[in-house]
Image (cartoon, grey):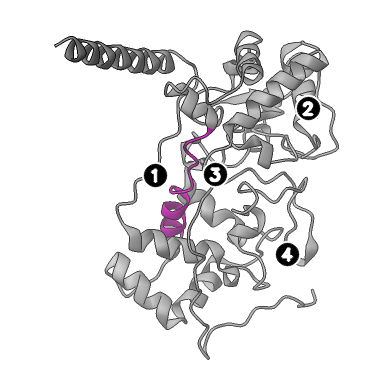
Amino acid sequence: MKRTIISAALILLTGGLAAQGSLAASQEPIQPIKAAKVTNPALVELGKKLYFDPRLSKSGFISCNSCHNLSMGGTDNIPTSIGDKWQQGPINSPTVLNSSLNLAQFWDGRAADLKEQAAGPIANPMEMAFTHILAVDVLRSIPQYRESFKAVYKTDEITLDEVTDAIAEFEKTLVTPNSRFDLWLKGDAEAITKTELEGYELFKSIGCVACHNGPALGGNSFQKMGLVEPYETSNPAEGVAGLTGKDADRFNFKVPTLRNVEMTYPYFHDGAANTLKEAVDIMGRLQLGKKFSDDENAKIVAFLKTLTGDQPNFKMPILPPSSDSTPRPMPFEKK
């Protein structure tokens, strides 16, 4: 009888602690990343193939994965991406990981969602340098692709709409749950160290969470780069001002996610900060008017490194072979 009472008490205690942990997590400005739920595996598999297929570029060399490399945190780890004929891209490639949580796509938010974003690079002369018509023609010429599109979309026709929809549905699966910080949010007090927790408390108290909040720690607002001190850069990107033409929108950029941030260097829209230590120092001064001590900086960096979650883990797609009628790439075409 006594043992039964003790067991019941332990159950009530652990249940109460779990409830307290859930309550504490719900009160934090950051929420855990949820695992992706795939309801249409064939659609996702088709999108995966398209994501990795360089034949959607004029050169036959550049794919979505070239600039958003899933082995490198969904980025390319260089200041600005390399486009067609080794052109220097205009801006740092944001990570594709957890991008489905963004309120809009691209640094300036010019695409409303992942589907709209997927169409942009294909026809951008500085990126994949193709045309939408030619890209679709390539896919139509490949029997296995025609079969896959028909199986998924129940039509013999392949259009850009289906292509970008499939890519977007694959990208929606690229979430990174189960970071150590998420485990802490869910009640595992030992998931992060004392130093990392102190870094998180600093991150909150100094005001970083005003912009970096929610499940993605960013991606849900636009903010001016250089609130307290002006940001100096030779990069021509103007942020939202490039769309609106308004000087007030100059240097207004979508706040980047901090998920997996230790993997997504270099940082900022111009890729000017090579390390987290440097990025934390610059953001403290320019956005918050705060000069962090070396100890404070190290603690915040330690916290940021707890945000690395489970990376995409899947079998690489085997792309269907081109047919005799498939338009051939033109990597060395002279202008």
Rendered location of residue 18, percent (x, y)? 34, 18
Q: Earlier in the sequence, mark 2 or mark 1?
A: 1
Mark 3 or mark 1, which is nearer the start of the sequence?
1
Q: Amino acid at mark 4?
A: Asp
Q: Is residue 151 above or below residue 281?
A: below
Residue at position x 58%, y 15% in the image: 210
Which comes before the other along the chain, label 2 or label 3?
A: 3
Out of 213 and 324, give the one closest to the viewer: 213
Is residue 224 a member of the stretch shown in magenta? no
Q: Which residue is mark 3?
A: 97
Left or right for 27, reference 297: left
- Disc 2/disc 1 C-alpha distance (Å): 31 Å
| Residue 207 vs residue 107, the one in the foreground | 207
* Residue receiving disc 1: 36
> Residue most toward the left?
1
Q: Earlier in the sequence, mark 4 or mark 2?
A: 4
| Mark sitting earlier along the chain (4/1) | 1
Magenta segment, which residues?
164-179
Mark count: 4
